[in-house]
Image: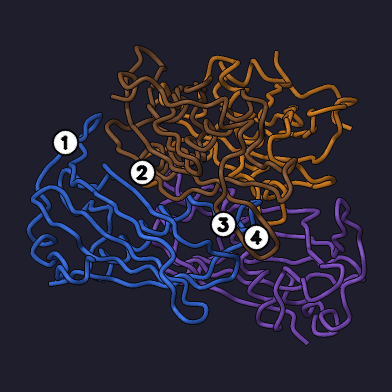
Chain colours: A blue, B brown, C orange, D purple
Amino acid sequence: MAYEFKVTRRIEFSETDMAGIVHFSNFFRFMEMAEHGFYRALGYSVIMDQFDPPLGFPRVHAECDYRKPLRFEELLEIHLLVKEKRPRVLTYLFKFRNVTAEPVEIARGILAVVCVSHTPGKMEAVSIPPELASQIEAAPAEMLI
Amino acid sequence: MAYEFKVTRRIEFSETDMAGIVHFSNFFRFMEMAEHGFYRALGYSVIMDQFDPPLGFPRVHAECDYRKPLRFEELLEIHLLVKEKRPRVLTYLFKFRNVTAEPVEIARGILAVVCVSHTPGKMEAVSIPPELASQIEAAPAEMLI
Amino acid sequence: MAYEFKVTRRIEFSETDMAGIVHFSNFFRFMEMAEHGFYRALGYSVIMDQFDPPLGFPRVHAECDYRKPLRFEELLEIHLLVKEKRPRVLTYLFKFRNVTAEPVEIARGILAVVCVSHTPGKMEAVSIPPELASQIEAAPAEMLI
Amino acid sequence: MAYEFKVTRRIEFSETDMAGIVHFSNFFRFMEMAEHGFYRALGYSVIMDQFDPPLGFPRVHAECDYRKPLRFEELLEIHLLVKEKRPRVLTYLFKFRNVTAEPVEIARGILAVVCVSHTPGKMEAVSIPPELASQIEAAPAEMLI
């Protein structure tokens, strides 16, 4: 049973804005990147076309609180934690740490994704397939603080 | 006194993803675009370098709820409403409508920005300058529902 | 017969980088945006799913020469000109002008796109459909200088 | 003396478009990412503020030829080669290989960057500082084919 995933990435020039810091919208790309890494670590891709009809995980809610700026070439650690598992919805908490030097938490995000089946012209919420759901559990409460 | 701003934009190909819909992170760029248009309509730019030290408005919180997908070439209306005005923080509500045909609300977002002064190597929260603050008020409660 | 298209857009904050100017990769998004506007002006979308199999226009070559920087909130005019029309390939020239004040040419780009048909798992170069090709011609040579 | 640099990255969902492949504009971000990694490997950052006035490397030309599509989660190798070294301008060649399975060249790019000094309100082309220039040489001709 898995409830966390970590990935580190170096900030690229194209991710900065004229304020000299990472543009706030990029933190949502970083969350998604960690989420997809989490599925890969479990042997899955977010594009689950081994199912018929194929499944996907569109986002229904996303949020982020920004505490400190992040700059070009700094190292960002994205720590995904499963916040809640429901039959059709997974909610993730993300702790962003600047690990260039002494690790410092700089932002915190949330992403809620719903499992849907794709039939031509239609998306319908469905239960997360048991093969995947059985591998995922919510993180211990003390890690979600 | 201003409390709202509307802008319409056509979805670009580069804003879609392989699911065939607008990538969720772009809604945060769209919010910011409307926010900056709001300041321009009041005669200001978000980069307020007529002040000394110059002022800026970094984001401290951003969130979005997604209800319906949005596709290439569709027309998106972004309706900014001032949700709350505090001495140092402005909170905006955004109603996203697909106005390609009959208008349909497809998403709703929130952005909280804090006024800071930029001195070399330092950002410090300060009061929104009265010239700008005096032109902005919270939207009527019934518009924020 | 059409051989040009113009569109103006205001530079967004998210399009700048820490050098305080528009990130160079965005000029390629701007070219594509003008190209798609050109097709729309002719009554087409770049996603031509009224054909069977559906047609698309992937890029085979893109280039840009940068002469002057472009900044936040400045107005950019993108002037598309048809440089060459071949049976399967369209080549466009783009003149980028900063029209915030006195117009100044700031960059120049080229995009070559090939018409392909999409059958499951396969893309194949095909002739541009006559309905579309018959509406497009190369711009006069003196405009391409 | 250095004349090449390699980096591998996994394609992210946000880098795809509705055609199901990597959006062509991202290849320019990938080139820049490899260029900056090349400077870091030599002990430099592209933001050279240890010099007075600080130096930068704006792009003056960028181009890319696309041969094969690249998809979500595939592994992309970016191989930077120094194509030409002039006193103020460095030109790089990039070979893009899909290395998910048997390596296949999928695109090829060029980037020309000019060394400039930043004084307030002005950018001026200057010679690349000898400490950096002395570490860089053009790649052997046979590697540039």
**C-alpha gap between disc 3 and disc 4:** 23 Å
Establish whether labels 1 and 4 are both on one chain: no
Which chain's residue wears label 1? A
Q: Earlier in the sequence, mark 1 or mark 3?
A: 3
Which mark's residue is nearer the viewer, 1 or 3?
A: 3
Query: For residue A92, what is the image quadrant?
Result: bottom left
From mark 1 to mark 4, how far is it between C-alphas? 41 Å
In the figure, residue C103 lies in which quadrant?
top right
Q: Which mark is residue B63?
A: 2
Left or right: C136 in relation to A126: right
Q: Mark 1 or 4, which is nearer the eye?
A: 1
Q: Position of residue A56 (x, y in %)?
A: 24, 47
- Name which residue type carries label 1: Glu
Depth-wise, is mark 3 or mark 2 nearer the camera?
A: 2
Same chain, marks 3 and 4?
no
Q: Which structural element holds mark 2?
A: strand
Provide the residue designation for mark 3. Answer: A15
- Marks 1 and 3 belong to one chain: yes
The local secondary structure at tag 1 comes to strand
Mark 3 vs 2: CB contact within 8 A: no
Q: Residue A89: percent from the left, percent from the top? A: 16, 49
| Residue A124 marker | 1
**Residue found 36% across the figure and 47% down from its top:** C121
The amino acid type, in three-letter code, at marker 3 is Glu
Q: Identify the residue at image location x=67%, y=71%.
A: D80
